[in-house]
Amino acid sequence: MTLSTNSRRAWWRKAVFYQIYPLSFADSNGDGFGDLEGIISKLDYLSDTLGVDALWVSPFYRSPMSDWGYDVSDHTDVDPLFGELATAERLIEEAHARGMRVILDYLINHTSSEHPWFVESRQSRNNPKRDWYVWRDPREDGSPPTNWVSVFSGPAWTLDDTTGQYYRHTFLPNQPDLNWRNPEVVEAMLDVARFWLERGVDGFRVDAAHQIMKDPQERDNPPVPPDYERPWKDMGEYDDYVHLYDFGHSDVHQAHRQLRAIVDSYPQEPIIVGEIHIFDLPEWASYYGEDLDQFHMPFNFHLMACDWDAGSLRVAIEAILWNVPVGGWTNWLLGNHDEKRLTTRLGPKHARLAAMLLLTLRGTPFLYYGDELGMTEAKIPPEEGMDPWGKNVDHLSRDGARTPMQWSSASNAGFTTGTPWLPLAANSNSINVETELEDPRSVLNLYRRLLAARHNSEALQIGSFLTHPASDNQVLVYRRESNEEIATVALNLSDEEAQVKIRSGRVIVSTADPDRAETISKKLLLEPYEGVLVTHQ
Ligand code: GLC
């Protein structure tokens, strides 16, 4: 562990991240798909208008686009849909020139079936790349080697006629799993990390990070018992089993430690953030590593699995913070390219409270593009669907959360001059950057005020967190404190007015009233669904 990457003031602890889904952000050439040049053209919006500090850019590598870029056929080149390698290099440079860091998606669990490694691997049982993937003989009756189900439904094994063996795929059949127990694979994938680190990236969001190591004995998963409580959202057929054996075998930690060691050897202090969908908190926290030598942060999805009320949020937040190891640091997110849009899940009133929560908790916030506008889930008829998961299981489609960014009230919301690859949300005429900038009460201006407040406050960036005794089932109140400053956040999650007793101070941001700036003396009044940030001398 290097001191700088874990120090209290490390850049990533103070940063606010913004996730860009490149296909849907900005289209520069009119083909209906967003691209890297499009992102470059919007960097001023991100750094100046909005004021975020770091970008997580979802995959733009060469890909047949079966899973829209999460199926990579060349990790070290850019897909022509998005631009060229030189465009990616320029994106990194231009972001840096504006003071923003850039992390990329790093896809370790699988490649595309069109990746040259897999094309070779499937050729014969004795091909030198055979063991780069996971090949097994059928069971005696010809069925797959285990009962494991793919995340996207259907068996996690596909029989390949050429050699009469099954290969394993945690996701789509054309996303074969890499064999991380083969040292050549580890070396090849670490080279991919080096390739991008040499080009100045500030780290990676590591895709499907806990999935790479499965039970070496390859035991069947037990079916769920009748009273089983799902830890997370409805996952269709995947929920029929308890996932004891198809992720997170203990040697996963060694693999992550190897990646961390590479990352730590680069001067830009890069970070790795792991996509860890584990809801048992001690197990989740084990992905920091016993010596904080694995992920700087495992992604914290816990608030998305939590009931949205003051009592449940308080319990969840305290439990998460208790479980972060000493010296570790967490993150918060309420949306990404795999989840239903925040504003649709919670409704517009709660979405404003969610903005304040996300930007005032102790930990690094990750915003998902368009959530800063209050973009809502678009209804897309199944026949126009693009998401392979949605094609397997209609109600699990992620398309609605991936629609084009809404820039203006021009045609196609200013996203493209062509035909957008996914339809726009119906409300793009009123919910867009241009319109919202004019309106002080807009969601965008609320985010801008919150971002500015966070940047100006050491207490909000790195201060301690304590829930306040005034918290109850209606109002969530907490305190953030640094050496120099104390702030209190009070969120009224109910439809009734509330009154809380807090020490005197000055209102900095209200989610309800952009002009609320009074000095309060011990008593804070909150409108229904109002959240207020107060600072104290
Ligand atoms: C991760 C990504 C998701 C993708 C899957 C397979 O979970 O977040 O979008 O479909 O991996 O690569």
Image (cartoon, rainbow, N blue to C red):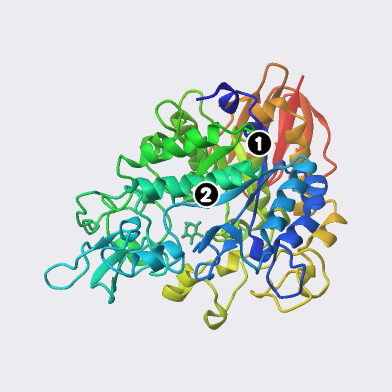
What's the amino acid at mark 1? Thr
What's the amino acid at mark 2? Val
Q: Dot 1 corresponds to which residue? A: 360
Circle 2 crowding by C-alpha within 10 Å: few under 14, some 14–19, many from 20: some
Q: Is residue 460 visible?
A: yes
Q: Is residue 59 visible?
A: no
Q: Dot 2 corresponds to which residue? A: 192
- Asked if residue 366 lies left or right of residue 158, the reply is right
Q: Quadrant of residue 82?
A: bottom right
Q: Quadrant of residue 264?
A: top right
Residue at the limit of the structure toward the bottom, as seen here: 383
Which of the marked residues, 1 or 2, is nearer the chain's N terminus?
2
Q: Residue at x 36, y 60 (%)?
A: 170
Is the residue 471 above or below the residue 186 in the image?
Answer: above
Q: Residue at x 53, y 45 (%)?
A: 193
Q: Residue at x 46, y 28 (%)?
A: 292
Looking at the image, is mark 1 or mark 2 nearer the viewer?
Answer: 2
User: At which x and y percent is residue 144?
Assistant: 22, 67
Is the residue 234 above or below the residue 362 in the image?
Answer: below
